[in-house]
Amino acid sequence: MWTMLRVIIAYRNYLIAWLTPLLFLALPLAVPSKEAQCGYTIILMALLWCTEALPLAVTGLLPVMLFPLMGIMDSTKVCMEYLKDTNMLFIGGLLVAIAVERWNLHKRIALRVLLIIGVRPALLMMGFMGVTAFLSMWISNTATTAMMVPIAHAVLQQLHKSEQEMITAEQASVESGKVNGGFELQETAHPSANGTVVTMEKEKKLVILQELEQKYQTFCKGISLAVCYSSSIGGIATLTGTTPNLVLKGQMDELFPYNGNVVNFASWFSFAFPTMIVLLVLSWLWLLFMFLGFDFRKNFGCGSTESEKSKSKVAYDIIRNEHRGLGPMKCSEITILALFIILVLLWFTREPGFMPGWATLFNRDGKSYVTDATVVIFIGLLLFLIPSEMPRCCFRGRAQQGGRAAQIQAPEALLDWQTVNRKMPWNIVLLLGGGFALAKGSEASGLSKWLGSKLTPLQSIPYPAITFLICLLIAVFTECTSNVATTTLFLPILASLSQAICLNPLYVMLPCTLSSSLAFMLPVATPPNAIVFSYGQLKVIDMVKAGCMLNLLGVLSITLAINTWAFPLFDLSNFPVWANSTSSAHC
């Protein structure tokens, strides 16, 4: 019996991958309609994505096979969904992120900010969270966490070491004083008196060191969780910060092709950045309370003693030495920083909303031809065209034998294809494409309209309650499955729901997207969680206790955002014409 169970567990992925299609095959056979066939495909992909019996990207390829066989879409149209404008925006954003990582610009920014903020416990936690969130806005959450966790642990280890040395030195001086005092004042004392004093001091020292070790372990847990949580929180602030944001952009363009580019870099940032700040501050306060308590003097360094100031100086010196080790800013770092600033400015000014953007210069017949992907691909191409050193720095060579002239070597470019090919997560491109193909298939088969007609009874529920429940559902669901798969599955359903009850689609799709980043409770929920868990200081229960409250704070923050400043930004009080054009309901 146990042997059979072990075999089933060992072969579970094969069993799921083979049995799932067979078990649900009754649906399209019993109801031979395109809606049922498309529903079968969605159920199959949802289960395979949740169980990860197949790689996520491989599951994303199923529409290429199933939709043509079922007569839902022909193969040419399905394949066109796998490389759309959103995919190019994703690739371009990662090109810039890879260049930043290659030349260590992100590490320089992180260390510099930590030097400015300081190393008091509360400020140190705030500094690591702020830097991690900022970097996560522009480069991948995983890369940000992988860089910040070793820096955080190095600082904490040195702080711990300095505290241990100071306590040992203090106890040694006390013991020496007490022993000498015994000889001077009580020459006739019992021979064991001095030994008793020393033993008591050793026991006291042992207790102090144990308390210090406990405090260090607790602070390590807090900082580790602060880093991984802030990387997930920071990613929601920009359109390219995390993949679910791009899934929303792609699904909006797929489901509502005449939406007037309502979701772009500027509009997303205006909505998501304040939300990120609110959630980041609440997360900092919660972690501060949970792992450090609300001792204002101790946490913020008010009225610090000389020993506390000395410990802070040690930590500050570590960060400063790390920063000095990077040397002066190189030509490559300055160039990438300049290109990065240009990219952000071009994104913001393309369609700022309150005035015509520069993209209108390229409009033809009143139609916009330039998108955010155009901008980032332009900057990405420049990374391959600009040398990493200025010409005056690179005409160096070595003398050749026989008195020949020195050989001139051109410097490498800011980015090369070998680095890109090694670091680019190509699987996400297929995963995104699979989601877009599902959305298109749902529309082509009529499943979206059928689903919308079944959801009309929800019209009686207050809209804020719908949003809150959606956020809770997504926040729980994303703990056990990929955030990309979560948004890919739920966004088309929510789009149908909004059309059925005459609600602006963004009112439910925006909260869904942001909630998919609230993966705080389990190590397997997201790669940043797994990275900090791998260092060994954390237990699952630590992450569950901290993450449960953060999930609730995140849901409340998103509900607040969508019902306040999101309303004027996206005109959420009105059902838009672009949504009504594809709706079966009369709104």
Image (cartoon, rainbow, N blue to C red):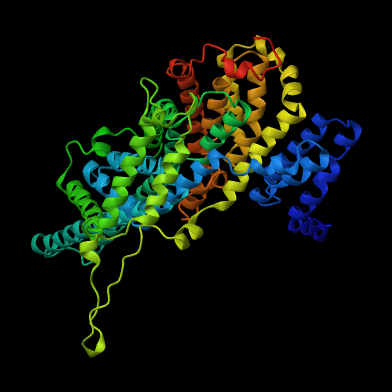
Residue 275 left/right relative to 530: left
Q: Quadrant of the C terminus?
A: top right
Q: Is any atom of residue 499 visible in this view?
A: yes
Residue 180 left/right relative to 147: left
Q: Residue furthest bottom?
A: 402
Percent position (x, y) of residue 314? 21, 54
Give residue 286's quadrant in the image. Answer: top left
State the residue in front, 382 or 36: 382
Percent position (x, y) of residue 184? 8, 63
Give residue 21's quadrant in the image. Answer: top right
State the residue in front, 99 or 105: 99
State the residue in front, 47 or 252: 252
Residue 577 left/right relative to 360: right
Percent position (x, y) of residue 510? 53, 26
Total labels: the figure holds: 0
Q: Is any atom of residue 468 visible in this view?
A: no
Percent position (x, y) of residue 359? 40, 31
Residue 106 left/right relative to 527: left
Q: Residue at x 59, y 27 (%)?
A: 257
The answer to whether 577 is drawn above or below residue 318 in the figure is above
Q: Residue furthest front?
A: 365
Q: Quadrant of the N terminus?
A: bottom right
